[in-house]
């Protein structure tokens, strides 16, 4: 009897009666906004695994919500010890290395499960949103949501959003054939945060300043549809003498960086690609500058940006 | 629930449920169908899945001889098997090629349209020899990932030398 019941349950799960359902724009925005809001406004804690190619990392995360803003703490559980704090507009990393502890300022403030932009309506122009079946992640029921790129300039995403809250329990970046490029999956997730309501500060903020760039030496004449500038700063990079301009362009999900610095002698143009093709990079000379364009975006996007550059 | 899961013998049945769900690619589906034709026990389970599915959908059963019919069909046509409805039907990416083609045309139009000043040179000639300059370029990757991901793994990159005509402008 129990076996028969098991088969019935299994068959019920196996029948793809709903398959995937195309959503109207209104429904799609409602779903995406629910996911985006949950990631920022819901207190939660848990452990997730990040897998990129054949590399894996395990991270403990807590999201503390204080009024309208949230502060999250991420602790990397394997490999080199490090801890991150992400506030609304800034984030810092505490790193343990041979010289002891040090605090570094980070440029980005987002992390899994908070991956969608605050305003999700902008995604609809460039991604087709579909609702797929129910699944189970970290012991919780979740609903699969697919964001398929409408052009060749971005990767797709498959999310599984907590049935109860909308919080993504799993997020997979996929290429045009649906092969996973980067995956995040909660192995445990609890709504609400146990223990102290707020986090003790990590110490004084780092001294290094990130200086904003208003207008750079290089003009970007082509950006793939939907991409817009999301950051432009001057920063020091390891193994580089002077400051480097760092621009970031994003469509809300995919990011492309551009680095501008004085060109060394005998610069050769290099094309770089990560093993699965997720990261693409092109270094070129433009007048007196070396320009490096790279991103977690398909090659056509990186190539088009790099080739559309001109001197101002 | 644990007891039920234990009864499922997941490893033994994975290929069967994948076939049932249409999740296998053409080659794997072909192999699975051949295996199904030779495995009486699996055929029995397949029959049960179908029966349960039909009952749940409210269709009349009356197909107790399903196993026998599949066996006969497989025996009659050992090499020619109709392709399954492709598993990719359930994925949203089958139109990606079409979209890419449209985008390629759009890029072609864009790059040919008159622009003020110099037009960026387009051809990229790739040199076959991969270069190991990960260390040199790692800071850029780290800086990019610093923005895009809170936590990033080391990314292995493969580099090739390319020549951009007019790149030294």
Image (cartoon, rainbow, N blue to C red):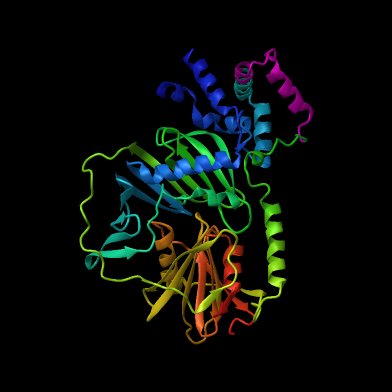
Front one among B17 and A14: A14
Q: Position of residue A255 (x, y in %)?
A: 49, 60
Q: Position of residue A61 (x, y in %)?
A: 32, 47
Q: Is residue B129 visible?
A: no
Figure quadrant of residue B47:
top right
Q: Does the magenta stretch include residue A102?
A: no
Residue at the image point whose x is 60% and y is 81% from the top: B167
Residue at the image point whose x is 45% and y is 61% from the top: B155
Figure quadrant of residue B85:
top right
Q: What stretch is highlighted in magenta?
A: B52-79
Could you tell whether A114 is left or right of B28 in the image? left
Q: Please state, as top left, top right, bottom left or bottom right, where the C terminus of chain B lies in the image.
A: bottom right
Q: Is residue B52 above or below residue A245?
A: above
Q: Please state, as top left, top right, bottom left or bottom right, where the N terminus of chain B lies in the image.
A: top left
Q: Where is residue B34 in the image (x, y as percent from the top left)?
A: 68, 32
Residue at the image point whose x is 36% and y is 44% from the top: A41
Residue at the image point whose x is 30% and y is 45% from the top: A67
Q: Where is residue A200 in the image (x, y as percent from the top left)?
A: 20, 52
Q: Is residue B55 magenta?
A: yes
Q: Is residue A234 above or below residue A127?
A: below
């Amino acid at each position: 009897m129990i076996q028969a019941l098991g088969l019935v349950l299994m068959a019920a799960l196996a029948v793809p009666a709903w398959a995937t359902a195309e959503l109207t724009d209104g429904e799609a925005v409602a779903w995406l906004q629910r996911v985006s809001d949950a990631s920022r406004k819901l207190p939660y804690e848990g452990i997730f695994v990040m897998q990129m190619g054949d590399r894996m990392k395990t991270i403990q995360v807590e999201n503390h919500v204080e009024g309208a803003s949230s502060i999250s703490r991420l602790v990397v559980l394997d490999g080199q010890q490090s801890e991150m704090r992400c506030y609304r507009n800034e984030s810092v990393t505490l790193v343990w290395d041979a010289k002891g502890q040090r605090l570094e300022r980070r440029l980005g403030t987002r992390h899994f499960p908070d991956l969608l932009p605050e305003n999700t309506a902008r995604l609809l122009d460039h991604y087709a949103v579909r609702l797929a079946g129910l699944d189970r992640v970290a012991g919780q029921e979740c609903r699969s949501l697919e964001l398929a790129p409408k052009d060749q300039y971005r990767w797709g995403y498959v999310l599984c959003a907590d049935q109860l809250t909308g919080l993504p329990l799993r997020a997979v970046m996929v290429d045009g054939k649906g092969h996973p490029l980067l995956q995040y999956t909660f192995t445990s997730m609890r709504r609400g945060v146990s223990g102290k309501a707020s986090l003790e500060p990590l110490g004084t903020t780092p001294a290094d300043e990130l200086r904003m760039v208003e207008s750079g030496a290089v003009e970007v004449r082509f950006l793939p549809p939907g991409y817009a500038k999301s950051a432009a700063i001057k920063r020091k990079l390891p193994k580089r003498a002077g400051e480097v301009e760092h621009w970031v362009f994003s469509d809300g999900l995919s990011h492309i960086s551009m680095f501008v610095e004085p060109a060394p002698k005998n610069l050769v143009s290099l094309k770089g690609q990560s093993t699965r093709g997720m990261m693409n990079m092109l270094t070129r000379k433009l007048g007196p500058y070396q320009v490096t364009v790279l991103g977690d975006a398909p090659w056509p996007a990186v190539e088009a940006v790099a080739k559309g550059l001109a001197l101002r | 629930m644990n007891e039920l899961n234990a009864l499922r013998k997941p490893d033994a049945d994975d290929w069967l449920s994948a076939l049932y769900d249409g999740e296998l690619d053409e080659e794997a589906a072909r192999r699975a169908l051949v295996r199904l034709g030779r495995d009486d026990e699996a055929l029995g389970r397949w029959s049960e899945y179908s029966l349960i599915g039909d009952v749940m959908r409210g269709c009349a059963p009356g197909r107790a001889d399903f196993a026998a019919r599949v066996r006969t069909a497989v025996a009659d046509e050992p090499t020619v098997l109709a392709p399954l409805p492709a598993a990719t039907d359930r994925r949203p990416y089958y139109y990606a090629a079409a979209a890419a083609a449209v985008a390629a045309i759009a890029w072609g139009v864009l790059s040919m349209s008159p622009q003020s000043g110099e037009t960026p040179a387009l051809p990229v000639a790739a040199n076959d020899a991969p270069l190991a300059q990960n260390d040199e370029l790692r800071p850029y990757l780290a800086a990019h990932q610093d923005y895009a991901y809170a936590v990033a793994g080391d990314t292995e990159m493969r580099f090739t030398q390319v020549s951009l005509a007019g790149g030294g402008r």
